[in-house]
Amino acid sequence: MVIKTATYLISSPDWTKCPKPDYPEYAFIGRSNVGKSSLINLLTNNEKLAKTSGTPGKTQLINHFEINNAWYLVDLPGYGFAKRSMSQRKQWEKMIEDYLRKRENLMNVFVLIDSRHSPQKLDIDFINQLGEWQIPFSLVFTKADKSTQLEVSRNIKSFLNKMKESWEFLPPHFVTSTVKKSGRDKILDYIEELNVQFRAIA
Ligand SMILES: Nc1nc2c(ncn2[C@@H]2O[C@H](COP(=O)(O)OP(=O)(O)OP(=O)(O)O)[C@@H](O)[C@H]2O)c(=O)[nH]1
Ligand SMILES: [Mg+2]
């Protein structure tokens, strides 16, 4: 898929303030600092579109971007950010749960996982929660440039093995690096397929 236009639309404190759900939508979520905003910039070929930072907790609201006047990308604040108070964490949970469960045009959630680490409980718990809510998702293993290929494939394998303990079918997965600019085409092709499905059911 060719990205012709990518524009920032709005940052919303909750799902009721989001744009009209008339386009298929794709949200990016994962641990703080895993690279959600950077991945959105890689996909859209625009390094300045979503705000990134070396310090976790940069993205705070539900950020909508409109692509090709046809679909939405959504940048979400990350989970597992240690410097948040309990009440901020509860607020995050409510905002995210409501958005994920109520957003009717949400076609897929991309859950980002840092490819440098072995399976983390926080990520597995979040994925199991998505399962309970029956929200379609796929996995993106990020920062593949930061370790060897062998290490990355080992971590992916053990993550998928961990998932097999509670999942009968495994979701699609992608591997990305914003430094090597890799993984972009496969994700965009996948989105394109889902856009076609959205048009068929709309
Ligand atoms: N080497 C490398 N660094 C990356 C990659 N993706 C992201 N980063 C870096 O990781 C840091 C965090 O990136 P962000 O895109 O801001 O992460 P985020 O998940 O949006 O973080 P929050 O909004 O705080 O939840 C930045 O310093 C990025 O430059 C990657 O593929 N490779
Ligand atoms: Mg961010």
Image (cartoon, rainbow, N blue to C red):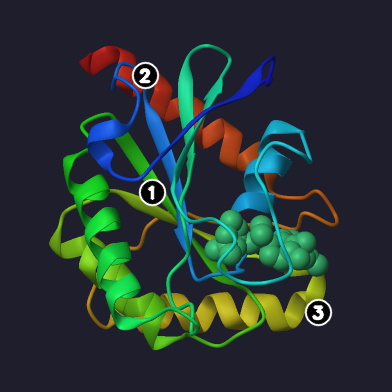
Three-letter code for the amino acid on which mark 1 is drawn? Val
The kind of residue on which mark 2 rests is Tyr
The residue under label 3 is which amino acid type?
Thr
Q: Sequence order check: which comes first, mark 2 or mark 1?
A: 2
Disc ID at residue 23: 2
Question: Mark 1 against mark 3, which lies toward the viewer?
Answer: 1
The location of residue 11, given as percent across then percent down, is 46, 38
Q: Which residue sits at x=76%, y=39%?
A: 48
Residue 27 in the image: above or below residue 32: above
Q: Residues within 10 Å of mark 2 (few under 14, many from 20)?
A: many
Q: Which residue is mark 3?
A: 148
Q: CA distance from mark 1 to mark 3?
A: 27 Å
Q: Which mark is residue 109?
A: 1
Task: Please tell me whether residue 73 is drawn above or below residue 75 in the rendered image.
Answer: above
Picture coordinates of residue 155, whole percent (x, y): 59, 82
State left or right for residue 76 relative to residue 87.
right
Query: Which SS class for mark 1?
Result: strand
Q: Position of residue 151 (x, y in %)?
A: 71, 83
